[in-house]
Amino acid sequence: MAYQNLLIDHSDGIATITINRPKSLNALSTATVAELNLAVEGVDGDREVKALILTGAGYKAFVAGADISEMTRMGTPAALTFSELGHRLCDALEALPIPTIAAVNGFALGGGCELAMACDLVYASENAQFGQPEVNLAVIPGFGGTSRLARRVGPHKARELIFTGDRIDAKTAAALGLALAVLPSDGLMAHCRAVAQKIAAKGPLAVSQAKKVIAAGSDLPLQAANALERQAFAALFGSLDQKEGMAAFLEKRPAHFQGR
Ligand code: CAA
């Protein structure tokens, strides 16, 4: 599949999607969001892929938001369709059975911050800036920012960020838990690949179940969340990988997982 706005790379079990519109700071046009939806679908069907990295082309931006030049022409029906497309993308990222990593290499604003927050792990370069500046344009976040930012940093801080539209730097984002770590710009991708490779070497069914249980459990009361954990924990004992992982430990050798 040839993409106009994305670069796709597959190597060593890791897929990397690079949003490639550097002239507009990788702004998310409708076509770009549609392509991202297709690319994520493609990853979903590929058993060889064990982790996905999402990043932006160049050193200035991850994604500077939804494409303002396109949104300026939208009325309510078109804005609803656009928002639905963005929500579908963020939901699809969260529903992927593999871990997703946002390599935030510059501005992650509006839809860019929302895209990063739909990923499981977020790492930022020193020059990264995060924010939901939609109120500057007299709109609100439209790709899940009101809900996901509140879940990531708490509703109090989310209100402040969304009401003021303030941008925060990478260190502040890390202090708030919006980013896991701050890396030098030229070391960001290597760090994300190292994390992805470490995860790719683990039992894939276990990683996938962990992702699922954490996501579902975080919206449930503790007892209900633990019930999900029990089911998933027990189900994994029916996998070949569990036998292999535990045998390998006892035999003091590396495990060879098959995802079965
Ligand atoms: N949409 C379309 N084009 C954008 C863009 C966006 N979100 N962000 C930047 N660009 C374009 C600029 O128009 C400019 O294009 P030209 O060279 O053709 O003029 C180019 O990218 C470079 O941008 P700047 O010259 O502005 O670069 P800067 O370094 O001076 O500023 C910036 C960088 C602070 C990120 C600034 O570009 C900016 O504020 N961008 C808009 C950020 C924003 O408001 N994002 C939220 C959009 S709304 C949204 O995302 C809704 C949602 O939730 C789905």
Image (cartoon, grey):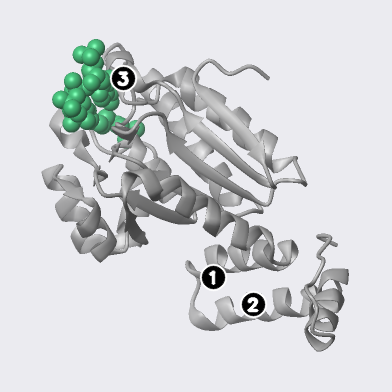
Q: Secondary structure at mark 3?
A: helix
Marking on residue 217: 1
To which quarter of the image does residue 114 belong?
A: top left
* Mark 1 Cα-neighbour bin, 10 Å: few <14, some 14–19, many ≥20: some
Q: Is residue 38 left or right of residue 119?
A: right
- Measure how far apart labels 3 and 2 are at the Cα level: 43 Å
Q: Amino acid at mark 1?
A: Gly
The image shows residue 22 at horizontal and vertical percentages of: 36, 22
Q: CA distance from mark 2 to mark 1?
A: 8 Å
Task: Give whichever of 43, 34 is nearer the camera.
Answer: 43
Report the residue marked by disc 3. 24
How many other residues sit within 10 Å of disc 3, few (<14), some (14-19) or many (≥20)? some
Q: Ligand 1 within 8 A of label 3's CB?
A: yes
Disc 3 residue type (three-letter): Ser
Observer-nearest of 16 and 253: 253
Q: Give the residue drawn at x 28%, y 14%.
A: 69
The reply, left or right, for residue 30 in relation to residue 109 is right
**Crowd band around label 2 with a 10 angstrom C-alpha radius: few (<14), some (14–19), many (20+):** some
Report the image quarter containing ligand 1.
top left
Residue 92 as seen in the image, left or right of residue 13: left
Looking at the image, how many numbered discs can be counted on the residues?
3
Residue nearer the viewer, 16 or 228: 16
Q: Identify residue for label 2.
A: 229
Nearest the camera: 125 or 165? Answer: 125
Q: Looking at the figure, which quarter contains the C terminus? A: bottom right
Most extreme residue toward the left is: 164
Q: Amino acid under label 2? A: Glu
Q: Is residue 82 visible?
A: yes
- Foreground disc of the pair 3, 2: 3
> Tag 2's secondary structure?
helix
Q: CA distance from mark 3 to mark 1?
A: 38 Å
